[in-house]
Image (cartoon, rainbow, N blue to C red):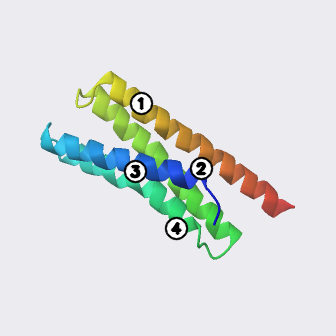
Amino acid sequence: MGKSILRDKSYLFAIRIVKLSQFLQTDKKEFVLSKQVLRSGTAIGALVKEAEYAQSNADFIHKLHIALKEANETEYWLSILFDTDYIEKLLSESLIADCKELIALLISSIKTLKLKTKN
């Protein structure tokens, strides 16, 4: 299978999220929000990977829609972590920028796939 920017970026984002969760639990002793962001932030890449073996185009689009919802939720948790002083501004901005990039890629992919399935 060829290179997939979405798959690669979502995988690298998941790694950042795992490291963030480890930091929050070890250094900040924060266990609830860290698990929330870990779940949603790693689910994005897992859903993108799962979509590779979708049963149909509709199933593929559906999995990307779920990944989009998880990305949106992750952005929410990252904002909460910043606004409650668990993470610094620079880290927050970097993670949210990556998350927004994933959201844009997912939206673009979904729109493109929907157009292809109509034709």
Tell me, yes or no, whether the two marked residues, 1 and 3, touch with CB atoms within 8 Å: no
Front residue of this view, candidates 98 and 77: 98
Q: Which residue is mark 4?
A: 50
Comes first in the chain, label 4 or label 3? 3
Most distant residue in the right direction: 119
* Relative image position of residue 59 (x, y in whole percent): 63, 69
The Cα–Cα distance between marks 4 and 3, rounded to whole angstroms, is 15 Å
Q: Nearer the viewer, mark 3 or mark 2?
A: 2
Q: Which residue is mark 1?
A: 94
Comes first in the chain, label 3 or label 2? 2
* Relative image position of residue 105 (x, y in whole percent): 61, 45
The Cα–Cα distance between marks 4 and 1, rounded to whole angstroms, is 26 Å
Q: Classify mark 1: residues with Cα within 10 Å, few (<14), some (14-19) or many (20+).
A: few
* Relative image position of residue 10 (x, y in whole percent): 49, 50
**Would you place residue 32 above or below residue 56 in this image?**
above
Q: Which residue is mark 2?
A: 5
Picture quarter with the C terminus: bottom right
Picture quarter with the N terminus: bottom right
